[in-house]
Image (tube, helix red, strand yellow):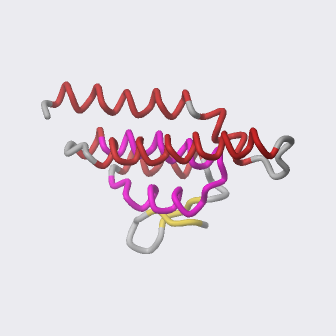
């Protein structure tokens, strides 16, 4: 994949995460108002999570991959999906994107002794 194609795919991941952000927020609500709607939103979010993670990890250029992973992490945090959020945070290696994660989610992520992200 060319650098231009990688950049376009990273932007596509970000766009999908924005598009499915409402579903993620609905999944993150503590008390669903409608069980049927909740099941629909959860399935939609999980499908989007799987698709966007697959796209992000297919990127070979580290900055684009980490940018895409950051977008997926943001979507997962809206859903309060800490298991996937932690795994995504640990996979991000670009320092400026790691710093952004800590700035955006200071109550959830810190750096460990090796300089990698982990849950607080």
Residue sitting farthest toward the bottom? 113
- Please state which of residues 101 and 56 is positioned toward the viewer in this rendering: 56
Q: Is residue 54 above or below residue 22?
A: below
Q: Which residues lie in the magenta part?
A: 65-93
In the picture, the quarter occupied by the N terminus is top left
Q: Quadrant of residue 75?
A: top right
Task: Determine the main secondary structure of the stretch shown in magenta.
Answer: helix
Residue that appears at 54% across and 52% down: 102
How many labels sit on residues?
Answer: 0
7 and 57: which is toward the camera: 57
- Give the percent coordinates (x, y) of residue 6: 23, 32
Identify whether 80 is placed above or below 65.
below
Q: Residue at x 47, y 30 (%)?
A: 16
Q: Position of residue 50 (x, y in %)?
A: 44, 48
Q: Quadrant of the C terminus?
A: bottom right
Residue name at image x 56 percent, y 63 percent: 83
- Residue extending farthest left: 2
Q: Magenta span has 110?
A: no
Residue 74: image location, x then y, percent: 55, 43
Left or right: residue 26 compared with residue 98: right
Pick the residue in front: 58 or 70: 58
Front residue of 97 and 1: 1
Expressed as whole percent of the image width and height from the top left, the position of residue 86 reads 51, 61
- The residue shown at (67%, 57%) is 107
């Amino acid at each position: 994949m060319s650098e231009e194609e990688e950049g376009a795919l990273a932007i596509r991941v970000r766009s999908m995460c924005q598009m499915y952000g409402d579903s993620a927020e609905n999944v993150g609500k503590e008390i669903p108002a409608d069980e049927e709607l909740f099941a629909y939103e959860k399935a939609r979010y999980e499908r989007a999570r799987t698709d966007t993670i697959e796209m992000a990890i297919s990127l070979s250029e580290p900055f684009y991959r980490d940018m895409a992973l950051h977008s997926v992490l943001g979507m997962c945090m809206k859903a309060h999906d800490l298991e996937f959020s932690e795994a995504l945070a640990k996979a991000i290696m670009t320092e400026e994107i790691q710093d952004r994660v800590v700035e955006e989610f200071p109550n959830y992520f810190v750096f460990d002794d090796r300089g990698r992200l982990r849950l607080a």
